[in-house]
Every structure is written in C-alpha cells, then in structure tokens.
C-alpha cells in the first residue's frame, strides 16, 4: 500500500488484494497465474476532510487449463462502479438527513450520480423490509412536488407505524403500485386528499391530514 500526498485536496492510496488464487469462471479450475495488473481508481470515504481515492491494482488471472483471462472481483466495490460500497453507504446516509442537491454539491458529485446511489440502496432497503411480510397498521399516502410550481407530483407510500418510506412512485397514480390494493383491505390509511383520486378504499379506515383540513383542501 502506498499513499500519494502531493495533492492537498485529495489523497490517493495504492492498494492490492491479497488474493493469489482464483477459480476460473469458464472451466471452474483453480489458477494462481497472474497475467498482468491494471489500476482501477475508485472514490472512498474522505480522510481528514480531503477526498480519498483507492487506486486498486486489479489482478488479471490466466487459467492454465483453458487459457481464459479474467479479472478478479472486488468485495469492496460493485462491478463497473467507481465508488467503494462504504462510500455509497455514506452518500445514502447523508441523503437521509439532507437533500440530494446539497449532498451533490458538498461531495462534488453529479446530481444524477447521487440520486442513483440513493435510489439503488433505498430499493434494496425497501425490498428487505417488505420481505418480512409484516402487518402494516397505518399506511401513509402523500404527494410531493419534485419542482415547485411545475405540478410534477409523485406519490410517497410510507409505513407510518414502522417509520419508513416504502416506495416513491414516478407519478401520483396509485394504481401503478400493485401492492397497494392488498394493503388497503387490512390497514388504517392516513392520506393527503389529492393523492387518492379514483382509488377504491372501501375496506380501509381513513384519516385525513389535519393540515389539509385547516387549508380547506377536503
């Protein structure tokens, strides 16, 4: 491992895995023959307020049985990504406490990149939570505007009792969420009036957002 401290604003660390043997993905034979290495630069968590990058010298193995060449897989980095897994988790956690735009500016990352990281990890978290098949007592439905004044609304579905967002729909049409129909037969529904147009809710117990009532939207 080597550290390049020439640049004041960032730290580059040269690393290499200790893997010296790998199973060939083509024939399944174990090989220890390394053909060559190549640098793979990925963003990692900051160090002392400076951007940190890992320059991983990935090994390219050559199978002695079938002559197939393949690069090693990295546990710390997803395939074809330029960020470590722990850095992506840091971005996700920061987005939970801040806006995607602010995180994008503070980390000097493209907005779409930050949004992609957040959405990808959020989807994994949602799938994990839904896999428990828990009984949802209070289901929250609300609309949010992505850009103020443009009426491009999205519907937010949340488990109020569990204190987490279950899904954010690309529009305000709840019919595009297949899981909703089943949930409405067994839960207490807390909603914003504009978010349930043309929705059959005959089997759900309803409550209306107090703010909406005070604003005369119901």
Image (spheres, rainbow, N blue to C red):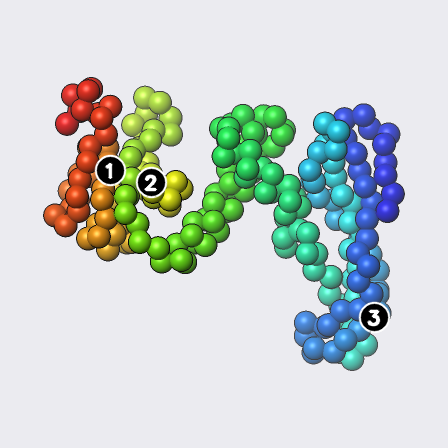
Is the residue under label 1 in contact with that under label 2 (CB below 8 Å)? yes
Residue 144 visible from this viewpoint? yes
> Which SS class for mark 1?
strand
Q: Which residue is drawn at 73% across and 72% down?
A: 23
- N-terminal label among 1 and 3: 3
- x, y percentage for residue 22? 76, 69
177 or 187: nearer the viewer: 187
- Disc 3 from disc 2: Cα separation: 53 Å
- Disc 2 from disc 1: Cα separation: 9 Å
Q: Residue at x 29, y 27 (%)?
A: 151
- x, y percentage for residue 182? 24, 55
> Which SS class for mark 3?
loop
Q: Mark 3 points at which residue?
A: 32
- N-terminal label among 2 and 1: 2
Q: Mark 2 points at which residue?
A: 160
Residue 169 visible from this viewpoint? no
Of labels 3 and 2, the one closer to you: 2
Q: In which quarter of the image is residue 28?
A: bottom right
Q: Residue at x 29, y 33 (%)?
A: 143
Position of residue 200 in the picture relative to residue 162 (left or right): left
Q: Mark 1 points at which residue?
A: 190
Position of residue 84 in the picture relative to residue 176 (left or right): right
Number of other residues with Cα within 10 Å of mark 3, as a class: few under 14, some 14 to 19, many 20 or more: some
Number of other residues with Cα within 10 Å of mark 1, as a class: few under 14, some 14 to 19, many 20 or more: many
Give the farthest residue toward the left. Answer: 202
Position of residue 9 in the picture relative to residue 179 (left or right): right
- x, y percentage for residue 29? 74, 78
- x, y percentage for residue 93? 55, 37
Position of residue 132 in the picture relative to residue 64 (left or right): left
- Disc 1 from disc 3: Cα separation: 60 Å
């Amino acid at each position: 491992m080597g550290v390049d401290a020439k640049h004041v604003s960032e730290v580059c660390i040269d690393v290499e895995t200790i893997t010296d043997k790998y199973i060939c993905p083509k024939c399944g034979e174990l090989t220890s023959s390394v053909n060559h290495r190549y640098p793979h630069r990925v963003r990692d968590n900051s160090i002392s307020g400076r951007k940190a990058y890992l320059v991983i010298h990935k090994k390219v193995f050559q199978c002695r049985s079938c002559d197939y060449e393949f690069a090693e897989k990295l546990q710390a980095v997803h395939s074809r990504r330029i960020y470590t897994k722990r850095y992506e988790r840091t971005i996700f956690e920061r987005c939970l406490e801040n806006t995607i735009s602010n995180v994008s500016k503070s980390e000097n990352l493209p907005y779409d990149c930050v949004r992609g990281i957040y959405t990808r990890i959020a989807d994994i978290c949602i799938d994990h939570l839904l896999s428990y098949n828990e009984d949802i007592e209070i289901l929250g439905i609300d609309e949010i505007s992505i850009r103020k004044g443009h009426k491009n609304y999205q519907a937010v579905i949340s488990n109020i009792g569990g204190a987490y967002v279950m899904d954010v729909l690309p529009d305000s049409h709840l019919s595009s969420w297949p899981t909703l129909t089943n949930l409405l037969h067994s839960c207490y529904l807390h909603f914003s009036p504009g978010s349930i147009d043309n929705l059959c809710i005959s089997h759900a117990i309803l409550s209306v957002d107090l703010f909406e009532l005070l604003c005369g939207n119901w």
